[in-house]
Amino acid sequence: MPDKKQVLSDFYYREAKKRGYRSRSALKLLELARRFHIFREGDCVVDLGAAPGGWLQVARDFVGPAGKVIGVDLSGIEPLPFDNVYLVKGDVFDPSVDMKIMEIAGGPVDVILSDLAPKFSGIHDLDHARQIELARSALKLAGRIIRPGGRMVLKLIMGSEFDKFLREARRMFQSVRLYKPKASRERSSEIYLICNGLRCLSNQ
Ligand SMILES: C[S@@+](CC[C@H](N)C(=O)[O-])C[C@H]1O[C@@H](n2cnc3c(N)ncnc32)[C@H](O)[C@@H]1O
C-alpha cells in the first residue's frame, strides 16, 4: 500500500500530466505565480534550469503573446509551440550563455526564474553546496540583467549556507519571502525564495 505522502505526490504528478505540463514542478510555479503575482502580461522572463519545460509553459501562459520567455538548460528542451519562447542550450557558469540571453532579451528583463538543480549524489551537504553554487550564479545574473524593481524566483536546498545566501538575496532585493509550494515533496528540503524589487546597487 502506498503511504499518504506517496499518494499525494502521485496526485501532483497526475495533475501535471492531466493539465499538459511537462513536469510536476510546473504546479509549484503555478502556485507561486498566483500567490505572489510574479508575472505581468508582456514581461520578459528568463528561466534558468528550464528542462524539460514545465516552468516555461507556465511563464508563457502568464506573459502571453506580448511577452518573451527565454529558457536555459544544459539539456536540450523540446521547443514549445510559441514564437516568443526561446531556448538556449548551455551552462549557467559559461559567460557566453549570459551573452546569448542578453542578445535574445534585447534589454533588461523583468523576471528571472531559477529551478536549477545539480545531479543529486544523495550526500546532502554536497548536494546543498552544489545547488547553492547554481543559485548564486542565478543571483549574479539577476544583478546584471534584471531591471531595477524586477523580480526573481529561486529554488534553494536548505543547508549550512542557506542563511548566508538569504542575506545576499535580501541585500539585492527590497523583499524576499520564503515559501514551500504544496506540490513540493514533504521530504524534500527545497524551498523557494520570492524576491521583489531589485535594488539599484552599484557593486552588483
Ligand atoms: C529541477 S530541473 C528543472 C525543471 C523545470 N523547472 C521544469 O519545470 O521543467 C533542474 C534543471 O537544472 C539544470 N541544470 C543543472 N545545472 C545546470 C547548469 N550548470 N546550467 C544549466 N542548467 C543546469 C538541469 O539540467 C535540470 O534540467
Image (cartoon, rainbow, N blue to C red):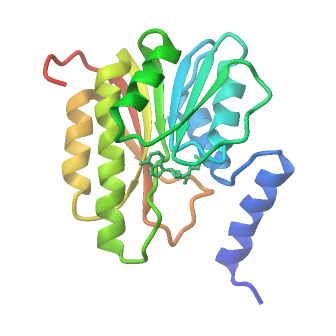
Q: Quadrant of residue 85?
A: top right
Q: Toward the viewer: 160 or 136?
A: 136
Q: Quadrant of residue 183?
A: bottom right
Location of the C terminus by quadrant is: top left
Q: Toward the viewer: 128 or 169?
A: 128
Q: Position of residue 41 (x, y in %)?
A: 64, 14
Q: Outermost residue, left direction?
A: 203
Q: Outermost residue, bottom direction?
A: 1
Residue lying at 76% horizontally and 45% vertically, measured from the top left: 21
Residue lying at 36% horizontally and 20% vertically, measured from the top left: 145
Q: Position of residue 132 (x, y in %)?
A: 31, 53
In this rendering, position of residue 66 left or right of residue 16: left
In this rendering, position of residue 77 left or right of residue 140: right
Q: Position of residue 80 (x, y in %)?
A: 75, 32
Location of the N terminus by quadrant is: bottom right
Residue lying at 32% horizontally and 36% vertically, measured from the top left: 139
Instruction: Please tell me whether residue 137 is drawn above or below residue 180 in the rendered image.
Output: above
Q: Position of residue 134 (x, y in %)?
A: 36, 48
In this rendering, position of residue 38 left or right of residue 203: right
Residue lying at 51% horizontally and 72% vertically, measured from the top left: 187
Q: Outermost residue, right direction?
A: 18
